[in-house]
Amino acid sequence: MRLFLAQIAAFLPFATAVVVCLLVIWGELVPVKLRPNLLHPAQVYGYLDTRLKEADASPPVDVLFLGSSKAYRGFDPRIWAGRGFRAFNLGSTGQTPLQMEVLVQRYADRLKPRLVIIEVDASPFMDEGVEASLDFFANGPVDRPALEMAWRLGHLKTWNAVGFGLWLECTGRRNPRPEPPSMGTDTYVPGGFVEHESGPFEPPSNPPAITIRLRRAQVEAFHRTLRALDVADVPYVLVSAPVTDALYRSRRGQDELTTMLQGCGRYMAMQDPATYDDRTHFYDLGHLNQRGVERFNTALIDCLERRGWLPGTGLR
C-alpha cells in the first residue's frame, strides 16, 4: 500500500503538468465553438475588464453598488454625482452572491465606501454561478478570493477558466488592449455604468411562469458577504430594483426571498407599477432603459434621504 501511494504521489506532478499543457493547447488552438468546456469571454460583454481596471485606480467612494446586470445597467453614478455623492458600480453580468463575495473581499477596503447598495433579485439566488465565474476569470485576476469561489463551485468549466486565466496572466496576455467605449448598443460610462441605447419595447402579455427556488450555496455566500461588511463597519442597503410588471407577475415563490431579505436589515423594494410602465421605462423584461434609470435613481436617492440612510445623513 505504501508503495502504491508513493507511486501516486510521484505521478501527480506529471499528470498535472500534462493536463495544464493540454489545457493551454486546447485554449490557444481550438475554436471557441469546439471547446464548450473552456469558455473565456474576455471583453465580450458587460465591460467587466474596464470596470475592474477603473476600480483598481479609483479613489475612495461614498457609495458602492453590487449586483448583476440590473446593477450595472440600473445604478448611474452620474445621477448620484449630481446629488453630491461619488459612486462606483461593481455590478457584473449574472453576478451571484458567490461573485459578490469576491468583490467585497477585493474592494471593500480599497474603495472604502461609506455605503454599499446591493441589488437583490431572485435570479442570482437561483443560479449555480458558473457562467458568471467564467466572466470573472476572463476579465479579472486569479487571486485568492477568486480561487475560493472556484473551489466552492467545483465545476469543470470554472477550473478550466482558472487554468487558462493563469496562463494568460503569466504570459502577460490577459486583455492587453482596452475595451472600446461602445459595443453595439452599449456604452461604458466612467464609474462602472453601462448605458443601453434602446428602441421601442413591447413586453409579452404572458411570459413563462418562473418558480423561485433559492440555492443554499448562494444564500450562504450572501450571508457571508453581509457579515464581512458588518465586520468592516460598512453600512449596506439591499435594494430590489424594478422589473417589468409582466415579469414580476410571472414569478412564483417570491415570499421566501422577501422574508430572507427583510431579515437582513435595511431592505427596499422599488417595484411599483404606478411609477414604472413596461413599455416606457424598460428595454427588456428585466432591465430599465435610460429614462427608467433616471426615474429609478432619483426615487431611490429620495427614499434613502428620507430614511436617513445616505452617507452623512445619520447612517452610521
Image: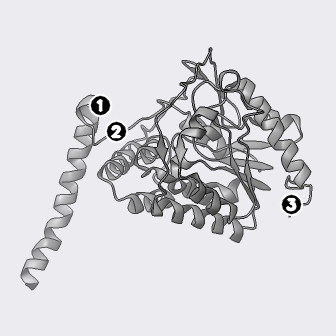
Spatial separation of the CA atoms under disc 2 and disc 1: 7 Å
Please report the residue visible at 78 percent of the width from the left and 33 percent of the height from the top.
Answer: 275
Question: For the image shown, how many numbered marks are present on the structure?
Answer: 3
**Residue 313 in the figure: left or right of residue 115:** right
The picture places residue 259, in percent across and down from the top left corner, at 64, 61
Label 3 amino acid?
A: Leu
Label 2 amino acid?
A: Leu
Q: Which residue is mark 1?
A: 32
**Residue 103 in the figure: left or right of residue 33:** right
**Residue 66 in the figure: left or right of residue 183:** right
Q: Is residue 85 visible?
A: no
- Compared to residue 12, the image places residue 182 above or below, namely above
Residue sitting at the far top: 199
For residue 39, the mark is 2
For residue 315, the mark is 3
Spatial separation of the CA atoms under disc 3 and disc 1: 48 Å
Q: Quadrant of the C terminus?
A: bottom right
- Compared to residue 39, the image places residue 108 above or below, namely below
Secondary structure state at the residue bearing disc 1: helix
Q: Are marks 2 and 1 in contact (CB under 8 Å)?
A: yes
